Image (cartoon, helix red, strand yellow):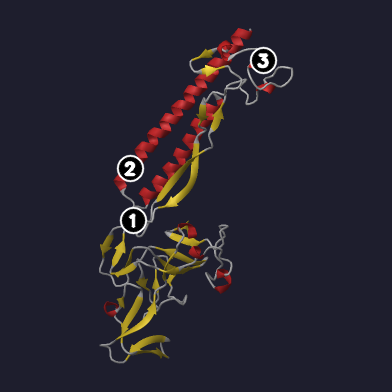
Amino acid sequence: MWRGLYTAATGMISEMKRTDVIATNIANADTTGYKKDVAIHKEFHNMLIKRVNDFDNGGVLGVDGAPFNTLAELGTSKEDITQIKGFNADPFYVPNIGKLGLGDYIDEIAVDYGQGALESTGNTYDLAIAGDGFFAIQTPEGIRYTRNGAFFKNSQGYLQDIRGYNLLDTAGNPIRIPSNVADSSVIITGDGIIYLPGDEMRLDEVTNRWEAIGNMANQQPLAQIQFVEFGDRLATQKQGDNLYYLVDDNEGNPPPIAGVNQDVQARLMNPDMQPRPASGELIQGSLEKSNTAIVYEMVELIHNQRMYEANSKAVLTQDAMLEKSVNSIGSLNG
C-alpha cells in the first residue's frame, strides 16, 4: 500500500508540472516567434515481482542440508508439488508474476520548434523566419538568440528589439541604418543581407553618422544579419523573454559575455552545438506567430486535470485502505 501511495503521488507531481508548462504556452499564445514547451514524461524503472520463498537455487531453499539440484534428490516428484491457478511450488520453477510500475516523472521540458503561422505587417524591419534559424542579439548577459523578428530603428539608427537589444550582423557588430536612408528603401533578402540605395557610405563629421551617397538608384549592401541555426536541438535552452542561450560545453555552462569566439569554439565538444548559417529564410515585412494552438492546449489542460484527479483519488483510496489495515490489526492485537 505504501508503494501505491508513492506511485500515485509521483503522478500528481508530474501532472502539476505539466499544468505549469501548459499555462506558460497559453500565456504566450500571442508572443511573436514563441515556441511552445512539451513536458516529456518518463517512467521509473519497473520492479520485478517474485513470490515469497521463490529461489533461483533450490539448494538455498531455507532448509539445512546438502545442496540439491533436482526434485528427485529431495525424495519427491513434481506431482507431489501443489499447483494452484498456474502457480507452482516447485523450487526449480520460478513463476512469472510480472513487473510493477513505480510511477513517472518529468524527464525534460522540450521545445517544439514547429513553424508558426506568418502574418504580414508591412513594416520594413519586421522579419519572419520560415524554417530553421535564430536571430543573434546583444544583451547585457552576452549574445542571445531569438525567433522574435519584431525589430525597429531607434533614434540613433540601430536596429533593436522591443527590449532595446541590438540586432547583430555576421561580424558580431550592431547594425546601424544611415540617417539619410528612408525605411521604405531598405531591402532585406532571404539570407539576411541588407541593401541600401547608393554606391558607397560616407561618415558625416557633424552628426557622426554614416550616410549613403552616389547614385541612389543603385543598391549597395550594408551588412548581413547574423541568422544562424544549430544541428543539435539541445544546443540552446530557454532563458526567458523569448530568448535562448547557447550551451557551449555539454555541461550546461552558459557562454561568456563576449559570446561565441575562437577561444570558446575550441571547448565545444559537439560541432552540432556551434552556430552555423541558417537553412531557413527571412521574410521582410512579416512576423512569425506563436506555434501554440489555444484549442489544443485547452484540451490538454482538461485531460491533465482529469489525470491529476484520478491520481488524487488513488492516494485517498490507498490512505483509506492503510488506515483500515492499521486499525484492524490494532483491534485484533488488543
Q: Quadrant of the C terminus?
A: top right
Distance (Cα) linking label 1 and label 2: 16 Å
Residue 105, given in percent of the width and then of the height, sits at: 50, 40
Q: Quadrant of the N terminus?
A: top right
- Front tag of 1 and 3: 3
Viewer-proximal residue among 56 and 318: 56
Q: Which disc number belongs to residue 290?
A: 1
Residue in the image at 47% along x and 35% along y = 11
Query: In screen coordinates, is 217 left or right of 269?
Result: left
Residue linked to disc 2: 298
Confirm whether residue 151 shows in the render.
yes
Distance (Cα) linking label 2 and label 3: 65 Å
Q: Marks 1 and 3: CB-CB under 8 Å?
A: no
Distance (Cα) linking label 1 and label 3: 73 Å
- Three-letter amino acid code of the residue under disc 2: Met
Badge 3 density bin: few <14, some 14–19, many ≥20, Cα 10 Å: few
Residue 16, given in percent of the width and then of the height, sits at: 45, 39
Image: 314 above or below 257: above
Residue linked to disc 3: 74
Residue in the image at 42% along x and 59% along y = 242
- Front tag of 2 and 3: 3
- Three-letter amino acid code of the residue under disc 3: Leu
Label 3 residue SS: helix
Residue in the image at 31% along x and 88% along y = 198
- Three-letter amino acid code of the residue under disc 1: Ser
Viewer-proximal residue among 280 and 134: 280
Image: 320 above or below 240: above
Query: In screen coordinates, is 135 left or right of 235?
Result: left
